[in-house]
């Protein structure tokens, strides 16, 4: 199969900062060329906390998840982040799998130093080698199940994966994950922004805009709505999210430095106030109008100038477009 469907299930109870799951997964789904990303589970038509309800830990219907679908879904459905290069091409013999011989391509990215010694230093793959699982964040991988023997194909991964600096860059450069700082940068022609611990990221200088924010976690992403690059687009969605939790959500200390959830909370959902500044670089930025939208996409107010947009404390969406209608070029 050249493409696949990814089923996304959450482990454990929902915790603050859930939005990073959505905003990071869909760009990587686009990178992998996946046919679909299926989230689990859409259990109602409104945002409501349901104490004791068996679907409560996994519901999509929260501000930080359903509220982030517009930009994230556009990135995936319209391919605003391009497919990456094929970095791994494996053939696994079913008989070998039945004999529990395993695969050199594990899913778990939390390697310790002992297992890192099994990662090949170049494109050659020997018996017993393990491919660095961070490869999925750099480019595409393909696995075929066939009894016909075929040697594995592995491209050099060192230009993309730097475990010393704790960074992974996609083959086309449109995604850069700093997992040491906990920040994903999206820098494609029609989709740009940051997701994660923005406070430690400083000012992110992307191709067509800059983002500065102290939100931790925070998610600020701009996407084109007219299939043009952000540099020339006449309709842009700027989307913002921070941290959410239900009213009354409580935890208590647990062994091993962890925390135990003792109350998943109740309505209404609470969202930490947004903070930050987005600056568009394009020459006509000062002439663009910026319309703040409510959670339903209805306009609230309009200001002139996208050269410096100070994020409103409770504004999820902004529509950015020319101030005066003009014939399309």
Image: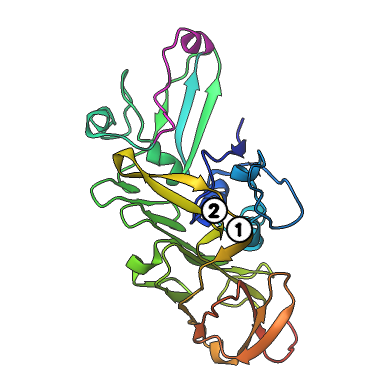
SS class, disc 1:
helix
Q: How far across and how far down the image is residue 64, in percent? A: 58, 59
Asked whether, in this view, residue 240 is left or right of residue 121, the answer is right
Q: How far across and how far down the image is residue 233, in percent? A: 63, 76
Looking at the image, residue 255 lies above or below residue 326: above
Q: Residues within 10 Å of mark 2 (few under 14, many from 20)?
A: many
Looking at the image, residue 310 lies above or below residue 214: below
> Is the C-beta separation of discs 1 and 2 under 8 Å?
yes
Q: Please state which of residues 226 and 193 is positioned toward the viewer in this rendering.
A: 193
Q: Main secondary structure of the magenta part?
A: loop
Q: Please state which of residues 319 and 208 is positioned toward the viewer in this rendering.
A: 319
**What residue is disc 2 on?**
27
* Quarter in which the C terminus is drawn: bottom right
Query: Quadrant of the rendered structure where residue 204 is?
Result: bottom left
Q: Earlier in the sequence, mark 1 or mark 2?
A: 2
* Quarter in which the N terminus is drawn: top right
Task: Give the label on residue 191, or none.
Answer: none
Q: Residues within 10 Å of mark 1 (few under 14, many from 20)?
A: many
Q: How many marks?
A: 2
Query: Quadrant of the rendered structure where residue 47 is?
Result: bottom right
**Highlighted range, magenta:** 94-108
Colour mode? rainbow
Residue 216 seen in render: yes
Disc 1 to disc 2, how far (Cα)? 7 Å
Asked whether, in this view, residue 136 is left or right of residue 51, the answer is left
Q: Please state which of residues 122 and 178 is positioned toward the viewer in this rendering.
A: 178
Asked whether, in this view, residue 131 is left or right of residue 113, the answer is right
Q: How far across and how far down the image is residue 317, in percent? A: 63, 73
Whether 103 is among the magenta residues is yes
**What residue is disc 1 on?**
72
């Amino acid at each position: 199969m050249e493409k696949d469907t990814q089923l996304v299930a959450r482990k454990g109870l929902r915790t603050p900062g859930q939005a990073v799951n959505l905003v990071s997964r869909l760009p990587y789904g686009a990178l992998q060329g996946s046919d679909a990303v299926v989230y689990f589970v859409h259990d109602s038509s409104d945002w409501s906390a349901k104490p004791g309800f068996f679907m409560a830990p996994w519901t999509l219907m929260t501000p930080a998840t359903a509220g982030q679908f517009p930009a994230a879904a556009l990135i995936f459905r319209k391919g605003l982040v391009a497919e990456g290069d094929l970095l791994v091409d494996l053939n696994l013999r079913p008989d070998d799998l039945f004999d529990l011989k395993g695969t050199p391509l594990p899913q778990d990215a939390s390697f310790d130093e002992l297992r890192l010694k099994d990662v090949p230093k170049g494109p050659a793959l020997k018996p017993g080698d393990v491919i660095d699982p961070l490869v999925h964040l750099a480019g595409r991988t393909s696995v075929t199940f066939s009894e016909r023997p075929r040697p594995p194909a592995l491209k050099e991964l060192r230009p993309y994966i730097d475990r010393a600096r704790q960074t992974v860059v996609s083959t086309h450069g449109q995604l850069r994950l700093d997992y040491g700082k906990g920040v994903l940068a999206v820098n494609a022609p029609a989709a740009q922004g940051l997701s994660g611990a923005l406070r430690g990221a400083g000012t992110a200088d992307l191709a067509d805009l800059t983002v500065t924010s102290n939100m931790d976690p925070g998610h600020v992403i701009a996407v084109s709505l007219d299939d043009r690059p952000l540099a020339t687009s006449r309709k842009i969605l700027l989307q913002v999210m921070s941290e959410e939790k239900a009213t009354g959500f409580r935890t208590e200390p647990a062994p091993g430095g962890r925390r135990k959830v003792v109350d998943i909370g109740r309505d209404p959902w609470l969202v930490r106030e947004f903070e930050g500044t987005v600056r568009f670089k394009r020459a006509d930025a000062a002439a663009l109008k910026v319309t703040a939208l409510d959670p339903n996409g209805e306009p609230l107010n309009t200001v002139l100038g996208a050269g410096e947009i100070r994020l409103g404390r409770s504004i999820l969406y902004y529509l950015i477009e020319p101030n005066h209608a003009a014939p399309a070029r």
